[in-house]
Image: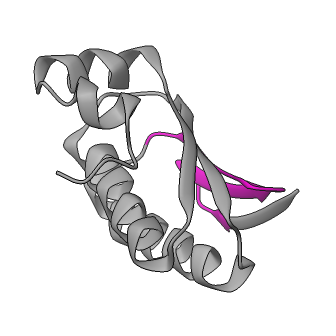
Amino acid sequence: MTTLLSTSHVSLIAQANTLSVNGDLTVNAAADVAAVGVKWLESAQLTEVTLDFFGVTRASSAAISVLFEWLRACHLLGVVVTSIMLSAPLERLTSLAELDALIKSPNTEA
């Protein structure tokens, strides 16, 4: 397990082929979390990855933006997203925004 980023509100952890976010992913932290995650995806040379947002405590568009940035990076790198795990608040937000299909099939071209 490697801590890639840690602040008082949010942390980003890489373990095997999983990238995990925990805490309150605010707008202020989103750009750093997204950038550090993309950098890890680029350097890890993975063929598949799990994106874990289960530890995100609040529903926010910032968290969804980070997820989309990582999905774009995976697509460009040819990394298959095997699973996306969302916390209950993020599941409600993605459902409300009608993003369920993308979350359930992240490797499908839009």
Is 99 located above or below residue 1 in the figure? above
x, y percent for residue 87: 48, 22
Q: Can residue 12 be seen by looking at this rendering?
A: no
**Picture quarter containing residue 44?**
bottom right
Query: In the rendered view, would you say 101 is above or below 51?
Result: above
Main SS class of the magenta portion in the image: strand
Q: Is residue 33 visible?
A: yes
Which color mode does the image show? one colour
Q: Tell me the residue at 38%/44% (across/down).
A: 106
| Magenta range | 5-24
Q: Quadrant of the N terminus?
A: bottom right
Going by the image, does 28 lie left or right of 5? left
Instruction: Indicate yes or no whether the magenta region holds residue 34.
Output: no
**Residue at the image point whose x is 40% and y is 49% from the top:** 107
Q: Is residue 10 magenta?
A: yes
Whole-percent x, y for residue 60 in the image: 26, 37
Q: Considering depth in this image, is 71 or 24 the residue closer to the camera?
A: 71
Q: So how many labels did they put on this image?
A: 0
Question: Residue 3 sits in which quadrant?
Answer: bottom right
Residue in the picture at 55% in, 56% down: 80
**Furthest residue to the front?**
109
